[in-house]
Image (spheres, grey):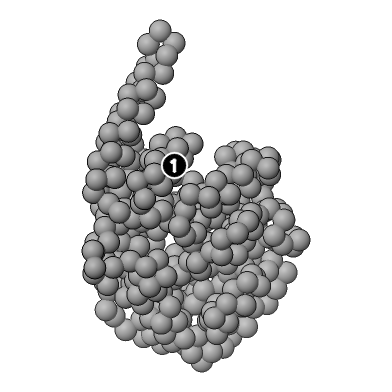
Amino acid sequence: MKKSKVFIGPANIANIGQTLKRAFDEVKIQSDYYVWRTEVNSLAFSYNKTLFLFNQIPKILNKNITYKLNYLIKLIHLSFLILKFDTFIFISPHTILPDNKDLKVLKLFRKKIIIFFAGCVERKVDFYHNAEYICTRCLDLEKQKFCYCDNIPKKSSRVQYYEKYSNYIISQDDSAGYLLNKKPIWPYVIADYPPPKNYLIKYQEKDLTIVHFPSNPLIKMSHKIIPVLEKIAKERGNINLIIKEKIPHSEVLLHLEKAHILIDALGLSYGVLAVEAMARGCIVVCGEMEFIKNKNLSENPLVQVNSNNLYEVLINLIDNPIILQRMAMRSIDFYIHYHAPKVTGEFYKNRLKLN
């Protein structure tokens, strides 16, 4: 049987591109993930391969020459990629051509198309009528405009356009709400293996390190989280509090190796950061999401909270070191069974019918 050749990209939202390739490598699926050379990489994720584009140059006779040149280059890239790959995994909403016009071309060439829904772009704004659901309390007007949250017909139409031309959709329940027919594949988050260490030994320390890394404070509800953390740190003498915004990915991982508790976000389920934390024996505190409980992830070690009980839950964890260590052990075990590259590689290989 012919071996699959998989393109991943051309964006690397939440490091999905790199971790998917890592998982495919584990199960001998040939893949490459690409990003545009001009893409801003604020978290310093490592790159596999880049696709050349011109940086913005001044307009000539009031015409955007850069756009025209880059469009031509994208057409050339697309031609090359069609010859090289038989399967395309796009991390929504980014494909090769503007307005996702390349999906029609790829379908014409009978390529397998997989769209990975990464979050806000596709998320159904009224999926939960809950005060802390991300869409209910979102104040990021610029992001709302980009995601068409102010134009629901256009938002749902874009999702259904992806549905029409894709073979598979990978999505959590809240981001699949505008799909008409396709049943999405559950997105098992992937995190690379951590350095081989005894991550449980840190629970013998007297002091506890609690970390919070708000890449987007509005989305993560940091304005609710940080005052609670500062109050606990002030009340307790054994709390080492680390709060940092938009730091390099490598620095995040170093902090997680030493951390006991990660406060990820409120009103959201868990993602890559949480999985990287669990792999290092760090307990994850995140928002409440009913659909997580309804999956075969119901035995997860996540501590699901809201803004009203965050303080109480954290104090209960801090005051019970034996429970902390048990949860840390469960977190590592959960990572190994559900999120390590080997197991996720096998899952996606089977569900996406790759060879």
- 94 versus 273 height, above or below: above
**Residue 278 appears in the figure:** yes
Q: Is residue 40 above or below residue 220?
A: above
For image coordinates 72% across by 62% down, the residue present is 128
What amino acid is at disc 1? Lys
Q: Residue at x 55, y 46 (%)?
A: 161
From the top left corner, tell me how far across and down residue 330 is, in percent: 46, 86
Instruction: Give me the residue at 56% from left, 72% from top.
Output: 285
- Is disc 1 placed on a helix, strand or loop? helix
Please tell me which residue is depicted at 44% across the width and 35% down the height of the picture.
98
Instruction: Pick out the residue farthest to the top.
Output: 61
Mark yes or no: residue 220 visible.
no
Q: Nearer the viewer, residue 109 or 175?
A: 109
**Foreground: 129 or 140?**
129
Q: Is residue 289 left or right of residue 330?
A: right
Residue 2 drawn above or below residue 73: below
- 279 or 102: nearer the eye? 102
Q: Which residue is mark 1?
A: 104
Q: How many numbered circles are shown?
A: 1
How far across and how far down the image is residue 147, in percent?
59, 44
Location of residue 19 by image quarter? bottom left
Query: From the image, which quarter does the N terminus lie in?
Result: bottom left
Which quarter of the image is occupied by the C terminus?
A: bottom left
